[in-house]
Image: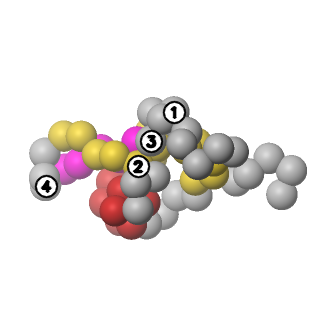
Amino acid sequence: MNYLHRWAGRAYSSGSFWAPSYFAQGSDDPMPGSTYGTNTLFSLDGTIWQLGTCPGS
């Protein structure tokens, strides 16, 4: 879920507490679904996170 990605440092949020918008850390990919959205993120270097599954998997 988006808020778990944020807690783990893979995403960040902006906007208000009641209506946050989530983005992948480093790439700024928008993550649909606000707080309880379920999105898959991947990173090739552990710093830049992108929306989607890891290429080649």
Residue type pointed to by label 2: Ala
37 inside magenta stretch: no
Residue drawn 19% across and 50% down?
A: 19
Residue drawn 54% across and 42% down?
A: 47
Q: Quadrant of residue 7?
A: bottom left
Disc 4 target residue = 18
Of the image marks 1 and 2, the number of the one nearer the N terminus:
2
Q: Is residue 30 left or right of residue 15?
A: right
Q: Is residue 56 left or right of residue 42?
A: right
Residue type pointed to by label 4: Trp
* Dot 2 and dot 3 residues touching (CB under 8 Å): yes
Disc 2 target residue = 11
* Dot 4 and dot 2 residues touching (CB under 8 Å): no
Residue 39 to residue 49: above or below:
below
Q: CA distance from mark 1 to mark 4?
A: 24 Å
- Front residue of 45 and 16: 45
Whole-percent x, y for residue 43 in the image: 63, 47
Q: Residues within 10 Å of mark 3 (few under 14, many from 20)?
A: many
Q: CA distance from mark 1 to mark 2?
A: 9 Å
Q: CA distance from mark 3 to mark 4?
A: 21 Å
Whole-percent x, y for residue 37 in the image: 41, 61
